[in-house]
Amino acid sequence: MAKRIIKITEDCIIVAHNAKFDYRILRTEFSRLGYDYQRQSLCTVELSKKLIPDMPSYSLGKLTKSLGIPLAKRHRAEGDAQATVKLLKILLNKDQDKSVLKNYVRLKPKKQVDTKLLNFLDTLPQETGVYFFYDKDKKPLYVGKSKNIRKRVSQLFTKDNPKAKSIQRLTEDVQFEITGNELIALLKENEYIKTLQPEFNRALTKTQFTYGVYVNKDSEGYLNFKAKPIHNKSKALVTFSNLASAKRFLEQLVNSYELCLNKTSLGNHQKSCFNYGIKNCYGACLGKENADDYNARAKEIIDRYSFENKNFLLVTKGRELGEKSLVYIKNGDIVGFAYFNLNLQIQNIKILERILTPVKHQRDAKHIVQSYMRKHPNRLKMIDL
């Protein structure tokens, strides 16, 4: 591919939406092959900001929609490239004297990935896990997780925002741990960030899950589901990082279990809810549906999502062939995670508890596990204990 790219881009200007990123990736890959790749580049983001000012967003998707440009196969090479071509034609027409275009053509990106960072990339695997950046004193700078460690670190080494530049400048060592799956990677990342307190993860050292859906019984005997800020003295059914996510979850419950909107925090506070008017509610808001019948559906939700007093294992793939991983939930708490090869190790509770890596930060860990179960139910096998 390298020779082909050199040939087809000779005497050409490389155009891309956010060209600095794409061009850096090309130069980085060629540098690893020992070749100094240089081409002129043009960024349609920068050009759009100059020639079409005051747009609400300059992302490719929103910009093309605002300009009436059809965008097929979004986030695929062909679709994005075709849309960028059409955007470029509009921009070229707008730049009638070509003065703007000339000013925005660049020969080199402002900063290249240096040899030190390139050497780190060669040691990193293209597997799921957690990675660590350290400074010259072996202090952790940043901890992250990814389904492809090398790809993610490469992206961090080629970004040019202030945070990324600081990480690039200070990094003297990069380490990693392969986890085999995203769930364990998320749990490890959460534990490491809160334990190691890396300089560039400060925003994540505190709990990130500040809203929850709570269940209570109203004066008429109906179970209500309310989205509100987390309160330490009461246990949420499920937790979320923001109110919008909690409300989306409630909307799914209302639609899937035919709940009354007025028995959730989505209600309009009228005598009858909106869904009753369109016959998607059986009339709990007016007392027409028996509370026991309504609560039977509500309890299905609680049984499905609550960890309260439950004991089970979540089993998924491990780091290598023949190995599996597990997350252990005991009395509703995330006790820890482990890797195992033999069923004996999970059938004997004493052995199971010996091989566990404990989880300290319960609330965030519980959110991670519950969220993963909601989003990826087919990736996990549940073993009821």
Image (cartoon, rainbow, N blue to C red):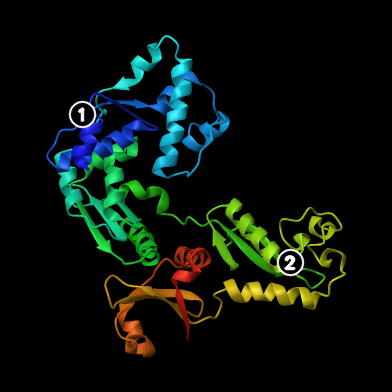
Q: Quadrant of the N terminus?
A: top left
Q: Residues within 10 Å of mark 1 (few under 14, many from 20)?
A: some
**Residue 53 vertical placement versus 157 (above, below):** above
Please report whichever mark, 1 or 2, sits nearer to the chain's N-terminal start: 1
Tell me, yes or no, whether the two marked residues, 1 and 2, touch with CB atoms within 8 Å. Answer: no
The three-letter code of the residue at mark 1 reads Gln
Q: Is label 1 in a helix, a strand or a loop?
A: loop
Residue behind mark 2: 258
Residue 38: mark in rendering: 1
For the point 50% across and 69% down, the residue is 377
Residue in the image at 25% along x and 38% along y: 26
Give residue 143's quadrant in the image: bottom left
Say if residue 160 shows up in the picture.
no
Identified by mark 2, the residue type is Glu
Quarter of image, res 183: bottom left
262 vs 136, left or right, is: right
Secondary element under disc 2, as helix, strand or loop, is loop
Percent x, y of residue 130: 30, 59
Pinpoint residue 287: horizontal percent, then vertical percent.
87, 69
76 is higher (above) or lower (below) than 288: above
Which residue reaches farthest top?
A: 97
Residue found at x 72% / y 77%: 296
Q: Is residue 150 left or right of residue 84?
A: left
User: Distance from label 1 to label 2 (Cα)?
Assistant: 60 Å
Residue 173, x across and y down, in percent: 18, 50
| Viewer-nearest residue: 342 or 171 | 342
Name the front one of labels 1 and 2.
Answer: 1
In percent of width and height, residue 84 lies at 43, 32
